[in-house]
Image (cartoon, rainbow, N blue to C red):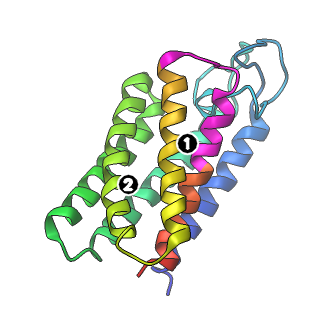
Amino acid sequence: MLVRHFLPLGIALSLVLLTVAVNSYPGGNQFSANSIGFDWKQNYLCNLFGETAMNGAPNSARVWAIGGWFILCATFASFFIGFSKNIAAKGAARIICYCGILGTTAAFLVVTPLHNVAITLTLVFLMISALYITIFIFKSKMTWLKILSILLFLIAYATAALYYTSFHLEILPSMQKATLVVFLTWVLSLQYFLH
């Protein structure tokens, strides 16, 4: 029973730690180095991972953020491993599993100086895994899950376009969080509603 609910438990624990990090963040964002605290519209999640906050203060959020992010990435990796075991096509199952693991490992590396490379690797590997999963979803009769999959690709690639072109950076932090929420919803939906 606990194995079936490992995914939401891991997500919940990681979100608790990330919430503590957000509430501990000293301040500063992309438009105002002197701001106080974490601004959901102007701070990126990666602002929580630095040794120093953007306002120059020691970042008391760092340990909580890295712990929460590690648990989230490990939880997602376990999802891809478990999900791939339910796929009869062994070649596709391996791609879902290995690309999911590589993508979530790369996602964790955003906490390091490899941030920019990690973003690219995360996008490539997770979207390959998501594409293979989406192919199986489109073979099902679950229309709402098909729509959610399309939404995931649209928001992920729109966010990537903003990131790589530096176009409208003022909305990128919000898009980053929206992408994470859609991805969380998609993964939980796959865990509980797709058979």
The residue type indicated by label 1 comes to Ile
Residue 178 lies in the magenta-colored region: yes
Residue under label 1 = 155
Residues 122 and 11: in front is 122
Q: Residue at x 50, y 82 (%)?
A: 2
Q: Residue at x 56, y 69 (%)?
A: 144
Which numbered marker is on residue 45? none
Magenta segment main secondary structure: helix
Q: Residues within 10 Å of mark 2 (few under 14, many from 20)?
A: many
Q: Position of residue 69 (x, y in %)?
A: 54, 45
Q: Residue at x 48, y 31 (%)?
A: 160
Residue under label 2 = 130
Q: Position of residue 139 (x, y in %)?
A: 34, 72
- The image shows residue 28, relative to residue 154, as above or below, that is above
**Real-space Cα separation, disc 1 to disc 2, in angstroms:** 13 Å
The magenta stretch is: 165-180
Q: How many marks?
A: 2
Q: Residue at x 31, y 65 (%)?
A: 81
Residue 63 lies in the magenta-colored region: no
Residues 111 and 161: in front is 161
Q: Position of residue 104 (x, y in %)?
A: 39, 47
- Name the residue at the bottom extreme: 1
